[in-house]
Image: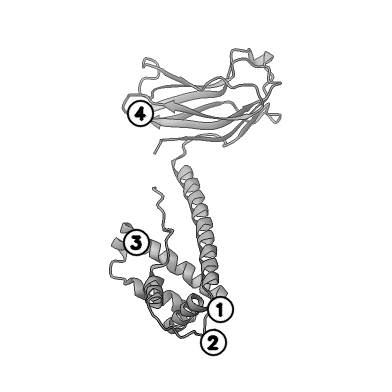
Amino acid sequence: MKYFKIIPYRPVLILLPLLILMSCTAKVEKPDSTGTIPEKDFISILTEIHISDGLLANPRIQNWVYKIDSLATYNYIIDKHGYTKAAFDKTVRYYFIRKPRKLTKIYDEILAELSEMESILAKEVMLERERTSNVWPGEKNYYFPDTESISSPDFRVTLNGNRQYILKFTATLFPDDQSADQKVSISAISADSLLTGKKYFFQSPVFPKDGMPHLYNVRIFVPVSGAIQVDGSLLDTCTPPDERPEHVYFEGITLSMPE
């Protein structure tokens, strides 16, 4: 799934011809606010027009709605809010002639709202992409020592060979951790030859005991066809299990193919 912007940051095209015409007219009658659209509704209409303008400019959208005229779309938006094109034109004319600074402020508010909408959309797309591509078999977060003795630092997952995967996580190793050379270690082997096949090894750098979160990426690639069995441990250390009171936090664990 690829994320593409649907909101271009440029003036609303439907207003440009009218604004240019007004700027080129020597004598312009100054309109009053009678019959104009209330500011809140006017902002909503302009916002939707701006979004539709961005959508219609996208080639993929154009292929879907090639028979729809952009002006018809704008008229539909205005009508949907319960106003006429004449009322909209009068409102634009009123703000452009009588309150140009207010019109500029309205555009600033619209762009700020569109920017926030785009940010939210980007986050939702990222979460959806992570949800659909993440094949990590365990929990997203782990804390050791696990006082409830539920979490295991070991994991196993079956993946497709000849594809690159990335184990991504953030690890925080606290200064009172008693283990030595703490890191994540992974081995992988062809699922068709578990006893005789070549085993491949991967690992993360040793975690620093500074109590600070550090982001890690462990790349996994086994150049064999078919399925591979991947085994690993979040807590690989040379310290014996009965001599290593751990104090480490793993968060945001994902296992997926890079885009």
Q: Residues within 10 Å of mark 4 (few under 14, many from 20)?
A: many
Q: Residues within 10 Å of mark 3 (few under 14, many from 20)?
A: some
The residue beneath circle 4 is: 161
Which percent across, then down, holds residue 126?
48, 46
**Three-letter amino acid code at the position of disc 3:** Ala
Residue 178: mark in rendering = none
Q: Marks 1 and 3, how far apart in space? A: 29 Å
Q: Nearer the viewer, mark 2 or mark 3?
A: 2
As drawn, the residue found furthest toward the front would be 26
**Three-letter amino acid code at the position of disc 1:** Pro
User: Nearer the N terminus, badge 2 or badge 3?
Assistant: 2
Where the C terminus falls, by quadrant? top left
Q: In the structure shown, which secondary structural element does the residue marked by tag 2 occupy?
A: loop
Q: Nearer the viewer, mark 4 or mark 1?
A: 1
Residue 38: mark in rendering = 1
Residue at position x 42%, y 26% from top? 220
